[in-house]
Image (cartoon, grey):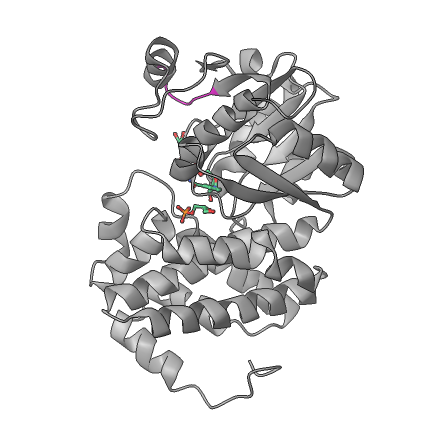
Amino acid sequence: MAVHDGSFRAAVFGAGSWGTAFALVLADAGADVVLWARRQELCDAINQEHVNADYLPGIVLPDQVRATHDAEEAAAGADLVVLAVPSQCLRANLAGWSAFLPPAAILVSLMKGIELGTAKRMSEVIGEVTGSGPERISVVSGPNLAREIAGRQPAASVVAAHTEELAQRVQAMCHTPHFRPYTNTDVLGTEMGGAVKNVIALAVGIAVGLGFGDNARASVITRGLAETARLGQALGADPYTFSGLAGLGDLVATCSSPLSRNRTFGERLGEGMSVGEAAAISRQVAEGVKSCESILDLAGRAGVDMPIVEHVARMVRGDFTPQDMLRSLLSRSAKPERHGH
Ligand SMILES: NC(=O)c1ccc[n+]([C@@H]2O[C@H](COP(=O)([O-])OP(=O)(O)OC[C@H]3O[C@@H](n4cnc5c(N)ncnc54)[C@H](O)[C@@H]3O)[C@@H](O)[C@H]2O)c1
Ligand SMILES: O=P(O)(O)OC[C@H](O)CO
């Protein structure tokens, strides 16, 4: 099944939906994979049943994937170290793992969030905590709903790295007959696309929860993409990235799919649940709920107007009901489509 020409060792930190699904992709691409999980019971279940029933029930993992709760054991001998925990807990966790990471290993972020307080992207946090330079760090992002990937449904993605050469190495390590990664050297744009689409998916979910149809959904997606690109460009991203897989591709998948945790979370808010109530019924992370504030922070620092992100943040804070949010967004002054914020 592998497209990569040779075996390698991968460590995946985080045995949630995406960490587990990506472990399966790497195994299909020829890797021996060790999956680090927070809970020993989950490791035991994965090792005995070859299923991660908590996050991907019904998906049988390849024999080349085994789990451990021991970070040192997970990292030992890894050529590739993949990080897949919720964005807001990366820094603290990575500080504990850093000493075990092989110095030559490539570090890959699967995460789609911006750190609260610092407004840093995940690749920046990885660089700071591990002391690694950009020549070792890459990012995988795109329309990649974990459940579909784990079911080996076809999907494309983007591997972004500082150099084309590094992106190509990681591309080869995760290329399978079902998973088709493209390369990109715009790390910043790739990460911004992934993080902001979660907030736009919350907004789409709110519109759906309010009972609106496809016109509203498409309008929020399109204006959401406009504000994502505006922020990205102000920060130095390549505008093309936002019409690619890590921009438009991921935005459309996330905002259209009932599998999206962010869209579903937004739908619950739109139906009248509080943030606390919506969080209580999901055991998985909806990154946009926290990242709306850090993205707004970043936009403020860059002097960029992001009305959809701002309205989602105000709703998450409890300043707005869904009806207030709708009224406020629609009562903004009329604008030209281009260059009108
Ligand atoms: N699920 C997807 O379809 C998907 C696809 C692409 C990218 N992502 C991104 O991947 C990242 C991980 O998402 P996921 O879907 O695997 O999330 P998840 O909620 O399914 O799993 C998160 C994992 O992190 C662990 N975890 C939670 N809090 C932790 C903490 N404080 N310390 C250590 N571990 C902790 C959980 O036990 C779990 O194993 C997110 O940034 C998400 O946006 C997810
Ligand atoms: O379930 P979500 O909303 O975190 O979205 C999952 C992926 O990011 C889709 O590419």
Quadrant of image for the C terminus = bottom right
Residue 166 % position (x, y): 75, 35
The answer to if 203 sits in the magenta stretch is no
Residue at the image point whose x is 31% and y is 53% from the top: 265
Q: Which quadrant holds residue 189?
A: bottom right
Residue at the image point whose x is 73% and y is 21% from the top: 103
Picture layout, residue 290 above or below residue 227 = above
Picture layout, residue 287 above or below residue 107 = below
Residue at the image point whose x is 60% and y is 82% from the top: 338
Is 261 positioned to the left or the right of 135 in the image? left
Is 286 positioned to the left or the right of 162 in the image? left
Give the magenta part as a residue range.
36-40
Give the total of numbered labels: 0
Q: Which quadrant holds residue 305?
A: bottom right
Picture layout, residue 285 above or below residue 44 = below
Judge by depth and name the residue closer to the eye, 308 or 58.
58
Residue 292 % position (x, y): 46, 59
Residue at the image point whose x is 56% and y is 88% from the top: 336
Q: Main secondary structure of the magenta part?
A: loop
Residue 317 showing in the rendered view:
no
Residue 25 % position (x, y): 52, 28
The answer to if 39 sits in the magenta stretch is yes
Residue 176 showing in the rendered view:
yes
Judge by depth and name the residue closer to the eye, 338 or 132.
338
Residue 116 % position (x, y): 51, 51
Quadrant of image for the N terminus = top right
